[in-house]
Image (spheres, rainbow, N blue to C red):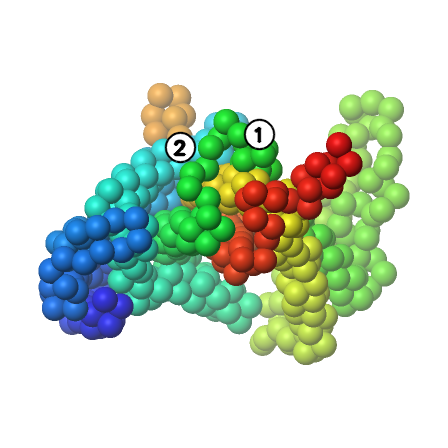
Amino acid sequence: LMSAGIIVCFLTTFLATHINPVKDMQGVEPVLMAQLIMSTILMTPAAYVVCYFFLPPVFDVPGKEGITYWAVFICVASGLWAGLAIGKLTEYYTSNAYQPVKDVAMSCAQGGAAPNIIYGLALGYKSCVYSVILLALNIFISYALAHMFGVAVSALGVLSTLATGLTIDAYGPITDNAGGIAEMSGFPEFVRERTDKLDAAGNTTAAIGKGFAISSAAMVSLALFGAFVDTVGLTSVDLLEPLQFAGLLVGAMIPYWFSAMTMKSVGMAANAMVEEVRRQVKELRGNDYDEKSNGGDDDQWTVFKSDIAEAKHNVDFWNKEVTRLQKENEKKESEDGVAAPPAEKYAACIKIATDASLQEMIPPGCLVIFTPIIVGFFFGVQALAGLLAGSLVSSVQMAISASNSGGAWDNAKKYISGQNLYVDYNGKPRQIVKKTKIYHEVHNASVIGDTVGDPLKDTSGPALNIVMKLMAIISLVFGPSFPSIEKGGLIAQAFKKFA
């Protein structure tokens, strides 16, 4: 099945390179999405051929008898088209060509950063609704036709167009880095504007890739959960049992704990990076850096006796700032180029990022690895079954909302910086253009939303896929070692002994 998917995705690449190449900036995202749609269409008959030739007409699996190759094909096709539908929903909620992201951008102009955050969070929560319904329908159909085997092959159906999904997913970081290189290299402003438009399409395609990863991770985790239940001998997961319900609550809490740890790690690394950049700027500009920014450290704590005194202070400060900027512009105009900072300046910032990415992942990793082991040994497999179910359900919702909120905030910022936002001014629409005061305020509000969204869509959201699968895998591997159902966990055994 995966081999057929690779061939189909290879043939689909000719759609973007020869049949329907990109002709302008607005055509990037539709062409990438057309590749995904075409690969899904071509993969459907290919999946039928694979099921027809490589499966017996009728066969049995644990928990289900008399499964036909037709039933397996329906499971694969269900996952294949559910993945595409979730991808299209993700595009709707994260692309600035559609109303949800435009509403987020408009909130920046209407109320600033706070409404931007509120709209972005609401968008992420709402984007879960239809995606989860599609995922639930897919799981129900697959389970009804072929038990857990159907769920597993349905996950393969989602991943059968993986080559195309990875292609459009990797497109986002490539264009993002290209924009950073263009800005650091001092390219003309129109180059950065073009890379921003490409990056806006890349944000959407990256979110689509995350949608595929989340849906496949949910189905794989469910299949692993079924294998765990069979391994330990559980016939059902009864939520009326106190241990299993308690495990369900704790499992639903794990993704929140994990996300809090990862997001705080991002914040700590960002603060360290900011302090390092400030130190370097002060070192390069000299001791007068503090006086050039925010009036100096002491000035930030000044208490003004009246509004007039504060206004006079602000006038004096900005007069000095204008004089400084004029001198800097004259200096830049007299220079042919700008010397690049020494390599060790970059190395210090890179070290902060790499050290944080490795060291700060140890606690979240230990949380995911040791939680199922501790629960399984001390509280028993019944509690662990509830833990896995709660973690799976909670992780899916959080991963979808985090990825889509982050993508929407990022593209809302791109929408504003592309000067596409119009607001009502005296009953008439007026464009918010650069180098105006209102643009500065609106853009600053969008940057705040983008800054909040980055750890959501790039760290916590994608990492929750691993939470789902890794907890299920560890539980399955350690399943034979856990105390039996009759004995219960170590705490239950101790309670029975001393009771």
Q: Please indicate whether residue 95 sits to the left or right of residue 396 in the image.
A: left
Is residue 35 positioned above or below 320 on the image? Answer: below
Q: Residues within 10 Å of mark 1 (few under 14, many from 20)?
A: few
Q: Which residue is mark 1?
A: 242
Instruction: Specify the farthest residue to the bottom.
Output: 343
Residue 112, placed above or below residue 233: above
Q: Please, what secondary structure does the residue beneath circle 1 have?
A: helix
* Residue positioned 26% across, 62% down in the render: 161
Residue that mark 2 sits on: 126
Amino acid under disc 2 = Lys
Residue 90, position in %: x, y?
34, 45
Q: Are marks 1 and 2 in contact (CB under 8 Å)?
A: no
Secondary-structure class at tag 2: helix
Residue pictured at 25% horizontal, 49% vertical = 64
Q: Is residue 210 left or right of residue 184?
A: left
Q: Amino acid at mark 1?
A: Pro
- Viewer-proximal residue among 115 and 140: 140
Q: What distance separates the C-alpha of mark 1 from that of mark 2?
A: 32 Å
Q: Position of residue 370 (x, y in %)?
A: 64, 54
Indicate the position of residue 201 as horizontal and vertical percent values: 35, 55
Q: Is residue 299 visible?
A: yes
Q: Residue at x 41, y 60 (%)?
A: 172
How many numbered discs?
A: 2
Which residue is located at x 85 percent, y 61 percent? 287
Q: Is residue 491 left or right of residue 152?
A: right
- Mark nearer the N terminus (1 vs 2): 2
